[in-house]
Image: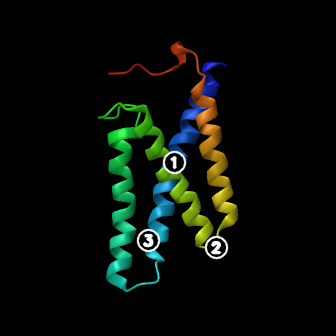
């Protein structure tokens, strides 16, 4: 694969991560509860997801445990897909799921020289 494929995959993965946070916020805002709980859920869910992502799943994660990285990605992005489906947006859920998978596939087998330097 050429370097362009890796960067396209990286961009797609990043956009899917942002969309996942937005989907979690949207779901939180639509919880059938009082306004206060909806606000807490709309802010708290994506915030908790972002913290977990930074700790375990980000390229420069604080904790480097592959199983935790996978579990975090599945919980955050799988939860976002489920949130979209549960709020009546199955097409958006499918688009997000495809973006997540494509982003992962395009970045998983990139040649070493195509990957950004760690550090």
Q: Is residue 107 above or below residue 70?
A: above
First along the sequence among labels 3 and 2: 3
Between 81 and 35, the one lying in front of the other is 81
Q: Residue at x 65, y 61 (%)?
A: 92
Q: Position of residue 97 (x, y in %)?
A: 63, 51
- The secondary structure type at the circle numbered 3 is helix
How far is mark 1 from mark 2, CA to CA? 21 Å
In this view, the residue farthest toward the bottom is: 34
In this view, the residue farthest toward the front is: 67
Which label sits on residue 88? 2
How far is mark 3 from mark 2, CA to CA? 14 Å
- The secondary structure type at the circle numbered 1 is helix
Q: Position of residue 68 (x, y in %)?
A: 40, 39
Q: Residue at x 68, y 56 (%)?
A: 94
Between 45 and 14, the one lying in front of the other is 45
Q: Is residue 90 above or below residue 109?
A: below
Number of numbered discs present?
3
Q: Which residue is mark 1?
A: 74
Q: Residues within 10 Å of mark 2 (few under 14, many from 20)?
A: few
Q: Which residue is mark 3?
A: 28
Q: Is residue 18 left or right of residue 64?
A: right
- The secondary structure type at the circle numbered 2 is loop
Q: Is residue 3 above or below residue 22?
A: above
Q: Is residue 96 above or below residue 25?
A: above
Residue 18 seen in render: no
Q: Is residue 31 left or right of residue 78?
A: left
Mark 1–mark 2 CB contact (< 8 Å): no
């Amino acid at each position: 694969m050429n370097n362009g494929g890796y960067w396209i995959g990286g961009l797609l993965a990043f956009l899917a991560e942002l969309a996942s946070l937005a989907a979690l916020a949207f779901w939180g805002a639509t919880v059938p509860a009082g306004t206060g709980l909806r606000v807490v859920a709309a802010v708290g869910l994506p915030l908790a997801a972002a913290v977990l992502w930074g700790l375990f799943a980000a390229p420069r994660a604080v904790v480097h445990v592959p199983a935790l990285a996978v579990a975090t990605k599945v919980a955050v992005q799988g939860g976002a897909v489920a949130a979209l489906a549960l709020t009546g947006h199955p097409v958006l859920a499918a688009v997000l799921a495809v973006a997540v998978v494509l982003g992962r596939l395009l970045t998983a087998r990139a040649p070493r020289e195509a990957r950004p330097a760690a550090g």
